Image: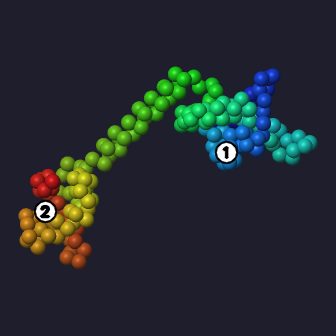
Amino acid sequence: MSDMATPQTQHDEWIDSEKACKILGLKLRAFQRKVQSGFVRRQILPPSADHNRQQALYSLEDVMNLKESKDNGASFAVAHTSAPLAAIAPTTAIALRDLQQTALQALARSVQQETKPPDKPWLTLKEAADYSGLPEHWLRRRCKESALGFEKPLGINVASLKRPKWMIKRTDLTEAI
């Protein structure tokens, strides 16, 4: 992650993480997640005589904007960008939301295509459950009952009696549904 070290101007005030957490009412880890998400700009100062280590300072303006949006009940889910919250225009936020929805829909379509059972005449118990939406235990019980001759066979056992492996004919499954 790159830190956005911007030159200080007269309007920029920088505070440490402790003050930022008090203003926002957040714990340090939650505040760090907001910084990593790009809601608050961070400036790293080199070690000085007062501090042996680098010191991170945060934009007071960004912290106040975040507090204001939190107080107004706004969601923090808009900005997963490197821009601070104050720099995101309302139209850009809407465009980001639409882009996220489009991406999620595309992902859902690809997952559905991947889970589509192959077009084969015989299905395993798991494939039959996925295809029909019925629970595996219900299908297993129906296969056992049909093997005993109580009703029309739903599936056949292709393994041993102690550890059966049921194969279900797709057409029989469609009729049973």
Residue 120 vs residue 45, the one in the foreground: 45
x then y, percent, for residue 7: 78, 26
* Mark 1 nearby-residue class (10 Å; few <14, some 14–19, many ≥20): few
View extreme (front): residue: 72
Which residue occupies the foreground of this view, 53 or 37?
37
Q: Which part of the image, by quadrant, shows the N terminus?
A: top right
Q: Out of 19 and 153, give the one closest to the viewer.
A: 19
Tell me the residue at 92%/42% (across/down): 49
Query: Residue at label 1?
Result: 26
CB within 8 Å, label 1 to label 2: no
Q: Name the quarter where the C terminus is drawn.
A: bottom left
Kindly tell me whether residue 44 is visible in this rendering: no
> What residue did someone put label 2 on?
154
- Mark 2 Cα shell of 10 Å, populated few (<14), some (14-19), many (≥20): many
Q: Residue at x 20, y 75 (%)?
A: 160
Q: Residue furthest right?
A: 49
Give residue 85's quadrant in the image.
Answer: top right
Circle 1 SS class: loop
Please tell me whether residue 112 is drawn above or below residue 126 in the rendered image.
above
Q: Label 2's element?
A: loop
Identity of the residue drawn at 69% across and 34% down? 63
How many numbered dots are placed on residues in this image? 2
Residue 159 coordinates in the image, percent (x, y):
21, 71
**Type of amino acid at the residue the image marks with label 2:** Leu
Instruction: Please state the horizontal and vertical placement of residue 15, each as a whole percent of the image.
Output: 78, 36
- Relative placement, left or right, of 88 versus 147 is right
| Residues at marks 1 and 2, CA–CA distance in whole angstroms | 58 Å
Determine the residue positioned at 45% across, 29% down: 98
Relative to 134, is 76 on the left or the right? right
Three-letter amino acid code at disc 1? Answer: Leu
